[in-house]
Image: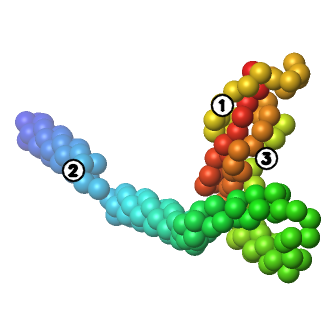
Amino acid sequence: MKKKENENNLEEEKIQSENQENLTDNEETDTQETPTDELAEMKEKYLRLYSDFENFRKRTAKEKVDLIQTASAGLIVELLPVIDDYERALANAPEGEISEGIQLIFAKINSVLQSKGLKELPAKGEVFDAEIHDCITQFAAPTEADKGKVIEVIEKGYTLHEKVIRFAKVVVGN
């Protein structure tokens, strides 16, 4: 009988030691990353890298478009005083003094500049807006409705592709 008990005890000890080995094996596999975890991590890194590259590509493409649109801004800004001079000459010249050909040339210059994105800012009669107007001085408004509005434009303002390149210099009624 003792022999049987010893055999049973040995078998129980064996089972317990096997269970303990299984437990330690399970713990080891839990701490090690499985291939699917590594694959998921690599996929996430790849997606992040890909999205960063796409953002970079879009940003540089937008910068190139902006650069192309504003490349002529310097030339256009330098031409604005010439346009102002011509408009003053046209407004102050006696009728018939400026030939029709010169007027056509000026109209053509204006159309080319407009095709490049140049637009005149609205000013006279508009409510004063510090974002697009530069107040030179203030005068008493002729009527109550003209308070806070632009009474006179000293120098026209312009935008190039929705960006102000020259503020309108104006007189405001108060």
Q: Quadrant of the C terminus?
A: top right
Image quarter hosting the N terminus: top left
Per the rendering, the mark at residue 154 is none
Side of 140 where 142 appears, left or right: right
Q: In which quadrant of the rendered view does residue 52 lie?
A: bottom left
Q: Depth-wise, is mark 2 or mark 1 nearer the camera? A: 1
Q: Residue at x 81, y 41 (%)?
A: 124
In the rendered image, which residue does mark 1 sit on? 137
Which residue was labeled with disc 3?
122
The residue pinned by badge 2 equals 28
| 77 to the left or right of 92 | left
- Graded by Cα atoms within 10 Å as few (under 14), some (14 to 19) or many (20 or more), the crowding at tag 3 reads some
Q: In the rendered view, does 163 fall on the left or right side of 171?
A: left
Q: Amino acid at mark 1?
A: Thr
Depicted 106 relative to depicted 77: above or below? below
Rendered image quadrant of residue 17: top left
Instruction: In this rendered view, identify the residue nearer to me: 68 or 48.
Output: 68
Q: Nearer the viewer, residue 126 or 137?
A: 137
Residue furthest to the bottom: 101
**Inter-mark Cα distance, 1 to 3:** 18 Å
Q: CA distance from mark 2 to mark 3?
A: 75 Å
Residue visible at 89% across and 22% down in the picture: 143
The crowding category of the residue bearing disc 1, from other C-alpha atoms within 10 Å (few below 14, some 14 to 19, many at least 20), is few
Q: Residues within 10 Å of mark 2 (few under 14, many from 20)?
A: few
Tag 1 secondary structure: strand
Q: In the displayed structure, does residue 135 sit left or right of residue 7?
A: right
